[in-house]
């Protein structure tokens, strides 16, 4: 099955009503958890650093809703969204950011390493590009075991200029691995415009041909469009037709990290993208499709209550016991290196 | 018992584990059709097929990354990095990802992966294909580090590494590939973290690793016959976990410690053993500890230059005799 055929088989038709509501809810969950994370930072309840994906929720949500429960996610230090959309609990995510015992990793990983293996979220990787070959390996394992699972690997535009990106794309293409590489092109690699440091205009899509892959660009702020691409590329992966490379154009509302106010970005550019905020625009679309406002308001109230409850639970959770720092270096649970 | 080369022991060890467990897969550059650039993996493709024995591009990050992703999702991969010097190319995935994943996730992820690599000098390959880099691995929490010196240990320790649930760096010594040793028939499974006492003496304890083990044994023979010095020789075998119980017992028995290390001087594994001995059995020592290493140099290529910098039997004997003056 060619990629075009896979596309027809999966259907580029619009998602049904239930799926659309699920997409909206998922985006909203991510948005409100991350806004809460920002507030908790301001209250000094979250330490270290944090990289928010405010404005980029449609990509994680579109893929998250399209993925099978047993698929694998690999993401970056900007990975709160990708972990949440797989079903990791809000308490686990907020608790991890706050360094509490209830955190997904009981405070041993922090914001940049969110992982929920039971949900197939196999790690947030804080070294740019490192997880692309690792995702290829998980896809290799799925191929070897014949499970029709797929791996989805999210990364930023900056990662397209690191060697691991190219090694992973080539290996995945040569071995026809069931992996979807998703470049979230938010136009800036940290503080520098991606165009200023990249040889081609589309950092991912323009490289696809080098690995015999189709060039795929999607509006990363349109969750329906992302969902359609996700269904199509996941179907191709499961059909044994190999990897895909998707470039999703998007924009982060805030700076690179907690330390960055994002002042290097032109005001007009920011304003133009803020008008394309994936949440209000999708809400408008749903209203236009005759979904009653009350139904959306109910979802919004529900998610807000969920985030409040998760915040409270995380606040009440104690810090991890100090002994935990000396565990799980090895599979025997300990850290001994000598007898 | 049969006589086997260290080289053939590699393929036998891999085959033993692949035959036992369908989840064991093997990947690396030139390992399948070509049988390995050191001819260590011949016959594996024919026996286990291209699905389990896979040639890769020259992409070290893809090799160890793929091994890691596969290990996290149920397989037990063996990855080959052709020369240990090339670990520098993929060290991010080894040291930052593979080694830390279990810890960072508080035990959510298990990492049963083995990275085999040809380590060490003696082949006149120069500074980028001859290094002893086991200390790079030793200093990263989360990595186990093994370096066998005999064909039987290659098989037994490789089996132990493959069966271990944690990442293991398996350093084969390229100067030992042609050496022979007796190997028992049947399945061999050894234990990580166990040093082996190869020779028992009463005056000095020599701790050696990989290609320095046969040199330590030869030096011990000459110390006995030419200088009346009786030496114990311990093959350290495993740097992490480190068998300090055996090492400290044997050092206490003779009262003297000499480490024989192929690595450049600074931060070699021997320094760690000396430090442990100095702290824990200081009052059992009869003299200063001695580290015999390659000087802190990149390695030269010409025969006479390479021979001049590596610890030779002559240098080992000379330096030890001097400590008894």
Image (cartoon, rainbow, N blue to C red):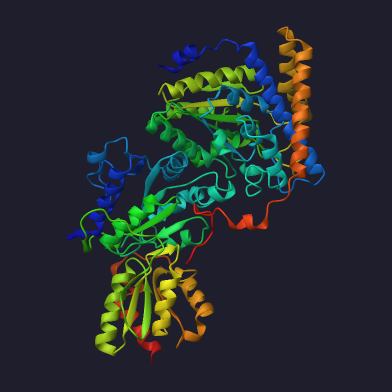
Is A309 in front, or is A52? A309
Indicate the quadrant where residue B145 lies: bottom left
The part of the image, by quadrant, that contains residue B219 is bottom left
Task: Looking at this view, name the residue that lies furthest to the top.
Answer: A290
- Among all residues in the image, which is located at the extreme left? B2
Whole-percent x and y of residue A212? Answer: 42, 26
Inspect this view and state whether residue B79 appears: yes
Query: Relative to B26, is A160 on the left or the right?
Result: right
Q: Residue furthest right?
A: A43
Q: Is residue A335 above or below residue A87?
A: below
**Percent from the top left, x then y, of residue A249?**
63, 25
Looking at the image, the residue that sits furthest to the bottom is B325
Going 74% across and 20% down the picture, which residue do you hit? A299
User: What residue sits 26% from the left and 53% below the top?
Assistant: B187
Q: Is B65 or A99 nearer to us in this picture?
A: A99
Q: Quadrant of residue B62?
A: top left
Relative to residue B117, is residue A301 drawn left or right? right
Quadrant in which the C terminus of chain B is drawn = bottom left
Q: How many marks?
A: 0
Q: Is residue B258 visible?
A: no
Image quarter hosting the N terminus of chain B: bottom left
Instruction: Please state the horizontal and vertical placement of residue B125, each as a whole percent of the image.
Output: 32, 60
Residue sitting at 25 percent across and 55 percent down?
A: B9
Image location (x, y in percent) of residue A307: 75, 32
A188 vs A48, nearest the viewer? A48
Question: In the image, is residue B302 above or below residue A285?
Answer: below
């Amino acid at each position: 099955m060619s990629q075009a055929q896979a596309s027809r088989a999966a259907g580029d038709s619009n998602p049904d009503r239930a799926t659309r509501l699920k997409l909206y809810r998922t985006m909203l969950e991510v948005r409100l958890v991350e806004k809460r994370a920002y507030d908790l930072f301001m209250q000094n309840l979250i330490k270290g650093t944090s990289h928010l994906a405010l404005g980029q929720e449609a990509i994680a949500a579109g893929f998250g809703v399209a993925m099978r429960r047993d698929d694998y996610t690999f993401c970056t230090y900007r990975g709160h969204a990708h972990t949440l959309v797989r079903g990791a609990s809000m308490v686990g995510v907020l608790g991890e950011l706050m360094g509490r015992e209830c955190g997904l990793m009981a405070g041993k990983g922090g914001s940049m390493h969110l992982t929920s293996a039971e949900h197939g979220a196999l790690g947030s990787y804080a070294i740019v590009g490192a997880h692309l070959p690792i995702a290829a390996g998980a896809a290799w394992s799925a191929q070897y075991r014949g499970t029709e699972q797929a791996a989805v690997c999210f990364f930023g535009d900056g990662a397209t200029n690191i060697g691991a990106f190219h090694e992973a794309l080539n290996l995945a293409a040569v071995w026809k691995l069931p992996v979807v590489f998703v470049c979230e092109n938010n136009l800036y690699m940290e503080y520098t415009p991606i165009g200023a440091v990249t040889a081609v205009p589309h950092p991912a899509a323009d490289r696809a041909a080098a690995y015999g892959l189709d060039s795929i660009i999607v509006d990363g702020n349109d969750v329906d469009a992302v969902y359609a691409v996700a269904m199509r590329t996941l179907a191709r992966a499961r059909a044994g037709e190999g990897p895909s490379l998707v470039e999703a154009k998007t924009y982060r509302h805030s700076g690179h990290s907690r330390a960055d106010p994002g002042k290097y970005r032109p005001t007009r550019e920011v304003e133009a993208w803020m008008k394309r905020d994936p949440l209000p625009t999708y809400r408008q679309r749903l209203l236009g499709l005759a979904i009653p406002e009350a139904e959306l308001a109910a979802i919004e109230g529900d998610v807000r209550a969920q985030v409040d409850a998760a915040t409270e639970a995380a606040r009440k959770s104690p810090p991890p016991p100090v002994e935990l720092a000396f565990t799980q270096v090895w599979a025997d649970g300990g850290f001994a290196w000598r007898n | 018992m049969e006589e086997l080369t260290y080289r053939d022991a590699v393929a036998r060890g891999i085959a033993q584990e692949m035959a036992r467990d369908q989840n064991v897969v093997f990947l690396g550059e030139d390992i399948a059709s070509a049988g390995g650039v050191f001819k260590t993996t011949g016959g594996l493709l024919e026996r286990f097929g291209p699905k389990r024995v896979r040639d890769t591009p020259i992409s070290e990050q893809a090799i160890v990354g793929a091994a890691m992703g596969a290990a996290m999702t149920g397989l037990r991969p063996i990855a080959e990095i052709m020369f240990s010097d090339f670990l520098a190319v993929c060290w991010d995935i080894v040291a930052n990802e593979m080694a830390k994943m279990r810890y960072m996730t508080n035990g959510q992820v298990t990492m049963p992966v083995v990275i085999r690599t040809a380590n060490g000098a003696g082949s006149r390959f120069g500074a980028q294909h001859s290094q002893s880099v086991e200390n790079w691995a030793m200093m990263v929490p989360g990595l186990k580090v093994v370096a066998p010196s005999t064909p039987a240990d290659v098989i037994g320790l490789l089996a132990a590494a493959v069966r271990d649930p944690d990442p293991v760096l398996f350093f084969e010594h390229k100067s030992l590939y042609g050496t022979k040793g007796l190997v028992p028939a049947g399945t061999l499974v050894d234990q990580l973290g166990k040093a082996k006492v190869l020779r028992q003496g009463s005056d000095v304890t020599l701790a050696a690793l990989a290609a320095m083990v046969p040199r330590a044994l030869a030096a011990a023979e000459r110390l006995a016959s030419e200088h009346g010095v009786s030496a114990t020789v311990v093959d350290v075998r495993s740097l992490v976990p480190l068998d300090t119980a055996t090492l400290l017992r044997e050092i206490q028995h003779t009262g003297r410690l000499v480490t024989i290390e192929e690595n450049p001087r600074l931060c070699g594994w021997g320094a760690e053993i000396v430090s442990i001995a100095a702290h824990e059995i200081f009052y059992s020592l009869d003299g200063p500890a001695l580290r015999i290493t390659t000087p802190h140099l990149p390695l030269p290529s010409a025969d006479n230059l390479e021979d001049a910098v590596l610890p030779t039997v002559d240098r080992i004997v000379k330096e030890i005799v001097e400590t008894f003056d």
